[in-house]
């Protein structure tokens, strides 16, 4: 199973993200993310590696001229080139079987929205980190599940 990790640029809860990273690492599944420096996704990837996790794939536009990639940790994982930042949410969705949200962000909500059209999939929002619900239109049209950290392991089989 290919797991997409989405979350905010600002890390909300290190302990909970570390716990999630350990669960995902133990599942034996690879992860796909965009590890902006200092972000929750970067921290997740570092903790996933420490916990013995499998492959990490960084979905980034390697040669982007408009915004560049200086804000991304390029040392984490194998690069999957999405060509431009505008293509990043679509490419993340194309590459993954499920999405796990480790906190709400505008970019994460965009990625969740793309699951309607590009390889529809379950989206697991970890309510221990972010208790806010998504807009009701998203809940009606997408495969959204609000789960606790303890429920995550059963979803990764």
Image: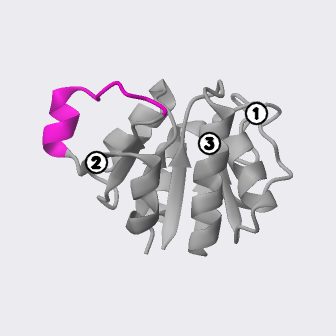
Which marked residue is nearer to the observer: mark 3 or mark 1?
Answer: 3
> What range of the chain is rendered magenta?
129-141
User: What residue would you read off at disc 3?
Assistant: 17
Is residue 82 in sight in this rendering?
Answer: no
Q: Residue at x 78, y 50 (%)?
A: 46
Residue 50: image location, x then y, percent:
81, 59
Residue 69: image location, x then y, percent:
77, 37
User: What residue would you read off at disc 2?
Assistant: 145
Mark-to-mark CA distance, 1 and 2: 34 Å
Q: Residue at x 23, y 26 (%)?
A: 135
Q: Secondary structure at mark 3?
A: helix
Does 83 sit above or below residue 51?
above
Q: Residue furthest right?
A: 75
Q: Is residue 19 magenta?
A: no
Mark-to-mark CA distance, 3 and 1: 27 Å
Q: Secondary structure at mark 2?
A: strand
Q: Residue at x 39, y 67 (%)?
A: 154
Is 17 or 70 nearer to us in this picture?
Answer: 17
> Considering only order in the chain, which callout, 1 or 3, is on the residue closer to the N terminus?
3
Q: Residues within 10 Å of mark 3 (few under 14, many from 20)?
A: many
Q: Are marks 1 and 2 in contact (CB under 8 Å)?
A: no
Is 29 or 16 nearer to us in this picture?
Answer: 16
Residue 64: quadrant of the picture: top right
Q: Are marks 3 and 1 in contact (CB under 8 Å)?
A: no
Q: Residues within 10 Å of mark 2 (few under 14, many from 20)?
A: some
Image disc number at residue 68: 1
Left or right of 43: which side holds 4?
left
Does 102 sit above or below residue 79?
above
């Amino acid at each position: 199973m290919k797991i997409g990790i989405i979350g905010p640029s600002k890390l909300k809860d290190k302990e909970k993200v570390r716990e999630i990273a350990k669960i995902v690492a133990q599942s034996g599944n690879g992860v796909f993310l965009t590890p902006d420096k200092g972000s929750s996704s970067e921290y997740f990837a570092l903790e996933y590696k420490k916990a013995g996790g499998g492959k990490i794939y960084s979905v980034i536009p390697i040669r982007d001229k408009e915004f560049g990639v200086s804000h991304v940790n390029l040392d984490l994982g194998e690069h999957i080139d999405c060509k431009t930042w505008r293509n990043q949410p679509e490419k993340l969705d194309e590459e993954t079987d499920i999405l796990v949200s480790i906190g709400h962000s505008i970019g994460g909500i965009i990625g969740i929205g793309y699951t309607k059209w590009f390889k529809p999939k379950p989206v697991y929002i970890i309510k221990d980190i972010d208790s806010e619900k998504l807009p009701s239109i998203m809940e009606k049209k997408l495969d959204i599940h609000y789960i606790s950290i303890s429920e995550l392991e059963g979803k990764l089989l």
